[in-house]
Amino acid sequence: MNKSLRIPPTCLIKQKLPWLLLGSILGLVSCATTKEPSGQAQEISQNKDDPYENINRKVYDFNDKLDDYVAKPVADAYKFITPDFVERGVSNFFSNLKNVNVVANDLLQGKFEQSGRDTGRLLMNTTLGMAGLFDVAKTVGLEQNDEDFDQTLAVWGVPQGSYIVLPLLGPITTRGIPGAVFDTAANPANYVGAPIQAISLVNARANAEGSLKFIDEAALDPYVFTRESFLQWRTHLVNDGKDETTTDYSDLDLEDSPSVDKKSSSNLSTTNATKTPLPQPQPGIVNKGSSITPKKQ
């Protein structure tokens, strides 16, 4: 699995238990209704997709610190002691388990031809690939697809809803909450025991290191960068990659954002000049307040 960009953070792979998710969202909504000083209220929450930006930023900062002091040191130790081929095998194993979700959502979205290919990929890697440790299906042209219940709900006409940052879990939308519950229940990785799940968490955070570093170095305001990247990535998935959009960071108005990090201004100006598409997120990790999805293998 390629190691790339960071965003939806602190890093624990989504243990998206229904009560935790729903409890977190209720807490965010209740906090968001608390009155803010008039000046601050006008300064924040200017993005229509992010009406709870004030509380979201606080949760993002919490996740960011948790990543710095807990998740990153553990992931760095894992990368130091684990050979690259073992890391690849672990990533392949959990990616293969995720294909159970992919096939289910293929069917729910009416993608019957794709579901056949994804079923073939799952069966081939589970058998010839030794329980998914080796991605043999890719060698015969069966690429990894990324389908989840959030995308299924979008196909059914459910609107995206508001952007929210959950403690530990990172970015999500209100449509993504029931989607996360369904995907958690359908993913076999959540039934294999705590030690295997712990390996999954650490491996996912290790794979996201490059993404996290990119945001720290390139963005004036990592929160805004993370939000725009996450929303663009979800749109890209819902549209099956047909949106072909890029983001001009100058449009994000980062200079006026309340928590701009001026030390990175020179890096961002280079990005503006090239209008580089946002780096692909890597979902399922709490990387400093955002969730990221591993890139296709």
Image (cartoon, rainbow, N blue to C red):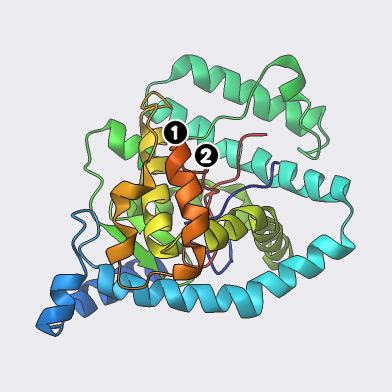
The answer to whether residue 223 is visible is yes
Which of these two is toward me, 4 or 204? 4
Q: Quadrant of the C terminus?
A: top right
Q: Position of residue 145 (x, y in %)?
A: 55, 30
Mark 1: secondary structure: helix
Q: Which quadrant would residue 255 be assigned to in this image?
A: bottom left
* Residue at mark 2: 101
Q: Quadrant of the N terminus?
A: top right
Q: Is residue 19 left or right of residue 190?
A: left
Location of residue 269 with respect to 234 vertically, above or below: below
**Residue at image location 58% in from the left, 59% down from the top:** 212
The answer to whether residue 33 is visible is no
Answer whether labels 1 and 2 touch (C-beta < 8 Å). Answer: yes
In three-dimensional space, the C-alpha distance between marks 1 and 2, rounded to whole angstroms, equals 6 Å
**Residue at image location 80% in from the left, 50% down from the top:** 87
Q: Which quadrant would residue 117 be assigned to in this image?
A: top right
Mark 2: secondary structure: helix
Q: Is residue 159 left or right of residue 90?
A: left
User: Outermost residue toward the left?
Assistant: 38
| Amino acid type for the residue under numbered disc 1 | Asn
Q: Position of residue 97 (x, y in %)?
A: 65, 42
Q: Position of residue 228 (x, y in %)?
A: 36, 50
* Residue at mark 1: 105
Q: Position of residue 67 (x, y in %)?
A: 59, 73
Question: Circle 2: is it few (<14), some (14-19), or many (20+) Cα within 10 Å?
Answer: many
